[in-house]
Amino acid sequence: MVGRDGEGHWIARDEEGLTGGVFADRSSAVRFATMESGRQAGAIRFAPASVRLSLFN
């Protein structure tokens, strides 16, 4: 899942919350998610703008 947190930082994290990070820009977050997902088609989802992601929930 890739999206923004409440402060506008880009977040990439897996659904279980086992891996993830905070990134300076969207492309860095997507690059991380792509590598972590093993480049599987359809593995990356984007959070709607109304949803705020966190690494800790």
Image (cartoon, rainbow, N blue to C red):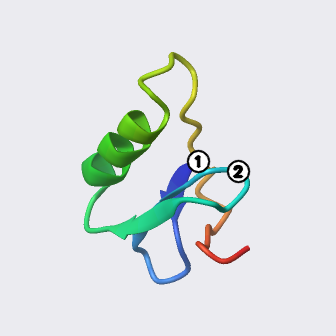
Say what secondary structure mark 1 lies in: loop
Tell me where residue 21 appears, x and y as whole percent.
Answer: 43, 66
Tell me where residue 50 appears, x and y as whole percent.
Answer: 66, 62
Q: Amino acid at mark 1?
A: Met
Q: Amino acid at mark 2?
A: Glu
Tell me where residue 54 appears, x and y as whole percent.
Answer: 61, 73
- Label 2 sits on residue: 15
First-in-chain label (2 vs 1): 1
Kindly identify the residue that appears in the image at 27 percent across and 46 percent down. Answer: 27
Say what secondary structure mark 2 lies in: loop
Q: How many marks?
A: 2
Q: Is residue 2 above or below residue 55?
A: above
- Label 1 sits on residue: 1
Q: CA distance from mark 2 to mark 1?
A: 7 Å
Mark 2 or mark 1, whichever is nearer to me: 2
Q: Are marks 2 and 1 in contact (CB under 8 Å)?
A: yes
- Which quarter of the figure is the C terminus placed in? bottom right
